[in-house]
Image: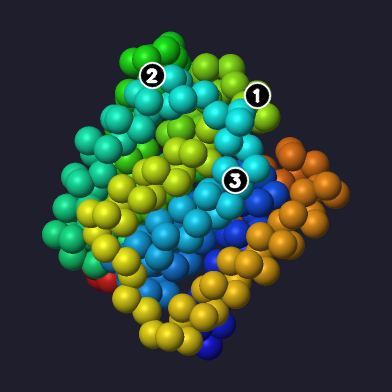
Amino acid sequence: MSVALLGLAVLLGASVQRLAGIGFALVAAPVLVLLLGPGQGVTLSNLAAGVISAVGLATTWRQVRPRTMVPLIAAAACTVPAGSWLAAKVPAPQLLLIIGGLVSAAVLLVIRGVRAPSLRGVGGAVAAGATSGFMNSAAGVGGPAVSLYAVNTGWTAREFVPNAQLYGVVVNALSLTVKGLPHLAPPAWAVTAGALILGTAVGHVLAGRVEERQARRVVLGLALAGGLATLTKGLAGLM
């Protein structure tokens, strides 16, 4: 049953990522954490999100803005080790609380579309990248900070997606370099790979049929539910 739920979480995350350009970690990471534990769940989320970002980048790399992405990626590289250290040192119940709280707060900030002058320009890129790198390594969810930077910078969805995919490839690779690959049994690896392929195909089919606004609502709703569930499990563990 747990392997089937693992496959379902990866399939759903891959579908929404291909459909909306972002969202794998927001949707799948909380579920993977609940199934595999904080360490392995976040690491598998990093791996799967990086793979999906690489697939998307293969067809959109010409729209990437390298100069804009350098401050984001450089700042993230500085904070990824700190997030990995936190994930390795904090006991599981407390880490579940941190992950659930970060996911839930990040979703609410994205829903509100927070506007702040500090999230613009090079300074905003550094702040967003540093926050995102830490959250990506510790909780598997680095996208919201980058999304808020994009909103405050005025990027369109067409501009955001390829740059977010480049960022996803690099930052998830950095996280895996620090933490290593997840330790899964062969059946779990096979289910994960199949779910990634099928989810990407499903998302590709739906991309032409579902409006971006509707897809965004689905992603954020699922992410908030997962974040709150993780937060609840952390509280239960402490009690």
Question: Of the residues under marks 2 and 1, which one precedes in the sequence?
Answer: 2
Residue 90 visible, this angle: yes
- Residue 156's disc is 1
Label 3: how many residues lie within 10 Å, few (<14), some (14-19) or many (20+)? few
* On screen, residue 64 above or below 99: above
Query: Where in the figure is residue 70, as x and y percent of width and height?
Result: 38, 25
Foreground residue, 197 or 203? 197
Spatial CA distance of label 1 from label 3 is 20 Å
Query: Where in the figure is residue 90, as x and y percent of width and height?
Result: 17, 59
Q: Quadrant of residue 214?
A: top right
Task: Spot the residue most to the left.
Answer: 89
Q: Amino acid at mark 1?
A: Thr
Badge 1 marks a residue whose secondary structure is loop
Q: Amino acid at mark 2?
A: Gly
Question: Of the residues under marks 1 and 3, which one precedes in the sequence?
Answer: 3
Q: Residue at x 32, y 76 (%)?
A: 183
Query: Where in the figure is residue 168, as x and y percent of width and height?
Result: 46, 44
Query: Where in the figure is residue 217, as x and y percent of width and height?
Result: 68, 45
Badge 3 marks a residue whose secondary structure is helix
239 vs 162, left or right, is: left
Residue 226 visible, this angle: no
Q: Give the residue at mark 2.
A: 124
The label nearer to you, 3 versus 2, is 3
Spatial CA distance of label 3 from label 2 is 27 Å
**Quadrant of the image for the C terminus?**
bottom left
Label 1: how many residues lie within 10 Å, few (<14), some (14-19) or many (20+)? few
Q: Give the residue at mark 3.
A: 58
Contact between labelled residues 3 and 1, with CB atoms less than 8 Å apart: no
